[in-house]
Image (cartoon, helix red, strand yellow):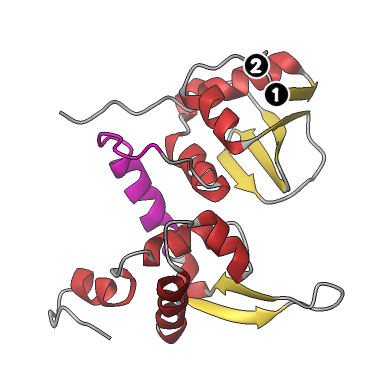
């Protein structure tokens, strides 16, 4: 393992998660375990060999572990360890910091990257006096987005909700950050439409740094 050979805590942390793709793997696992093929879908630019190597390194560092799901799934998945989950606040803080930088990529956000974007841009002041449970159906992914006095939570779940918003990740990104209309093609709402419309206003696009 390469090292900065620096006793600073920042350097010691980067010895374990500072290699390219490492923190993006953490991002992809924040909302639950994934198979290797799912990680490849979320990180399509990373080569299979590099992704495999990075996962091995994260396992060696105690950030990620590999386990087999019980039947009937019986698939091998990667998931964050308790130590790995401690990186959640770090990843969200980096997302907030980086979202103020100029956009240089025209690629789509992965579903989990979009989930992180929602969590990192949520504006509690805009939600004052508002509460809602919205199920987000993005292809095969189901998320429960809950706005409550305690804050905003997003979990991978299909639990009961006040309304359902069904679309794809690119369209949801446009609805939240691009001013796209709920009446756009490829958008389906079940339940309280006005509640969904209000929900989409709670994630203001960050101002760019000068």
User: Which residue does the image show at 53% across and 55% down from the upper left?
Assistant: 42
Res 184 label: 2
Quarter residue 209 falls in: top left
Res 158 label: none
User: Is there a contact, CB below 8 Å, between mark 1 and mark 2?
Assistant: yes
Relative to 154, say whether 168 is above or below. Answer: above
User: Which residue does the image show at 66% across and 27% down from the upper left?
Assistant: 131
Q: Is residue 127 visible?
A: no
Relative to 150, say whether 69 is above or below. Answer: below
Q: x, y (%) of residue 109?
A: 48, 43
User: Which residue does the image show at 30% across and 70% down from the upper left?
Assistant: 19
Question: Is 99 contained in the magenta span?
Answer: yes
> On the image, numbered disc 1 is attached to which residue?
187
> Looking at the rendering, in which quadrant would you find the N terminus?
bottom left
Local secondary structure at mark 1: loop
Q: x, y (%) of residue 208?
A: 25, 28
Local secondary structure at mark 2: loop
Q: In terms of depth relative to the viewer, which is nearer, 44 or 141?
A: 44
Q: Please, which residue is most extreme toward the right here?
A: 72
User: Which residue does the image show at 65% across and 37% down from the upper left?
Assistant: 146
> Looking at the rendering, in which quadrant would you find the C terminus?
top left
Question: Is 192 contained in the magenta span?
Answer: no
The magenta stretch is 87-106
Q: Is residue 126 visible?
A: yes
Q: x, y (%) of residue 126?
A: 49, 21
Q: How far apart are the alpha carbons under marks 1 and 2?
A: 6 Å
Q: Is residue 165 left or right of residue 43?
A: right
Specify few, some or many for label 2: CA neighbours under 10 Å numbering under 14, 14-19, or 20 or more.
Answer: few
Relative to 181, say whether 82 is above or below. Answer: below
Quarter residue 192 falls in: top right
């Amino acid at each position: 393992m390469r090292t900065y050979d620096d006793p600073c805590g920042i350097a010691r942390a980067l010895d374990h998660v500072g290699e390219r793709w490492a923190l993006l793997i953490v991002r992809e696992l924040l909302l639950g375990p994934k198979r290797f093929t799912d990680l490849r879908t979320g990180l399509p630019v990373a080569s299979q060999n590099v992704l495999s190597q990075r996962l091995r390194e994260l396992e060696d560092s105690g950030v990620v572990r590999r386990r087999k799901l019980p039947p009937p799934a019986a698939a091998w998945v990667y998931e964050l360890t308790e130590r790995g989950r401690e990186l959640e606040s770090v990843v969200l803080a980096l997302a907030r910091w980086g979202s103020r930088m100029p956009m240089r990529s025209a690629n789509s956000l992965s579903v989990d990257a979009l989930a992180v974007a929602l969590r990192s841009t949520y504006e509690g002041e805009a939600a004052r006096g508002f509460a809602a449970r919205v199920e987000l159906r993005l292809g095969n992914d189901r998320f429960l987005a809950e706005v409550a006095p305690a804050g905003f939570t997003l979990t991978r779940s299909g639990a009961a909700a006040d309304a359902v918003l069904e679309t794809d990740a690119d369209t949801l990104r446009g609805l939240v950050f691009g001013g796209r209309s709920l009446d756009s093609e490829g958008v389906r709402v079940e339940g309280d439409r006005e509640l969904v419309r209000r929900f989409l206003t709670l994630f203001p696009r960050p101002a760019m740094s000068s």
